[in-house]
Amino acid sequence: MNTKDKYPRDKGRPIRVKKAKSEQARWKKNSKNEKYPSDTFSIPFDIMVKSMEDSNCHGVKFCNGLDKNGKYTPIMAAINGEGEILTAFDTSETISSGEFEEARDNWNAEFPLEKGDMQFFYLGEEAIKKNIKDFEINKYQAVFVEQADGTDSAVLNGYHLDGMKDPGDDEDPDTSLNGVDFCPPFCGSDN
């Protein structure tokens, strides 16, 4: 692995689902998080997996965003080791890099990094692909959590869909993937 890469391919690891759910409950109970539009968002699984097929892809940034009307618009980007966007997408389709940046700028204007507001989290493509294979995952949901020490973090809750389950608040995930780089504190120059 190239040690100059800010975004490593292997970032992330599974954690116990019970632990992830308790950390999510802690995040929801913390009054400082009430200002945020949502604590979860769905991931377009097929788009994410296809984006990670690019040999230059080191992983995915899962970002908060707002559209021009101020509506919550989670956005994601498959990125290389330096953080450059290879493919951008929202919760349903691919988008341009310009649309990605606009949603990020709108979010930062409303929820500034300078005030410590959460921006994004990152997971490496190797960790995601291994999680998909090991747990036969075919649906993910991003969830913001608060660890026991009060640190904000996030998990990808993974579901193995068998045609019977519909992941939601009443359905436990099959796996949770954490070990993320979370902004803040990890942000770099490409917020």
Image (spheres, rainbow, N blue to C red):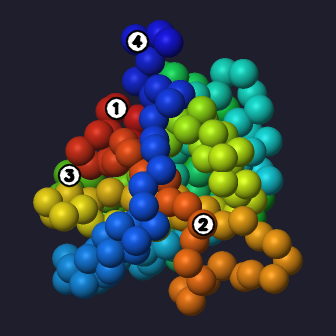
Q: Which residue has dot 2 on it?
A: 174
Instruction: Judge the density around disc 3: few (<14), some (14-19), many (≥20) Cα neighbours within 10 Å.
Output: few
Given residues 105 and 31, the one toward you in this image is 31
Spatial distance from mark 3 to mark 2, Cα to Cα? 36 Å
- Residue pointed to by mark 4: 4
Which comes sooner in the sequence, label 2 or label 4? Answer: 4
- The residue under label 3 is which amino acid type? Glu
Q: Amino acid at mark 4?
A: Lys
Q: Quadrant of the C terminus?
A: top left
* Circle 4: element type: loop
Q: Residue 172, position in %: x, y?
A: 55, 78
Q: Position of residue 148 (x, y in %)?
A: 19, 64
- Upstream in the sequence, badge 4 or badge 1? 4
Residue 189 circle label: 1
Query: Which secondary structure, mark 1?
Result: loop
Is residue 81 visible to the viewer in this orientation of the structure? yes
Q: Dot 2: what SS?
A: loop
In front: label 3 or label 2? 2
Q: Are marks 2 and 4 in contact (CB under 8 Å)?
A: no
- Whichever of callouts 3 and 2 sits on the residue coming sooner in the sequence is 3
* Residue in the foreground of this view, choosing between 66 and 158: 158
Q: Residue furthest left?
A: 149
Whichever of callouts 1 and 2 sits on the residue coming sooner in the sequence is 2
Dot 2 amino acid type: Asp
Give the amino acid at mark 1: Ser
Question: What residue would you read off at disc 3?
Answer: 114
Looking at marks 4 and 3 on the same chain, the residue that comes earlier in the sequence is marked by: 4
Report, in whole angstroms, how far the alpha carbon at label 4 lies from the one at label 3.
26 Å
The outermost residue toward the right is 163
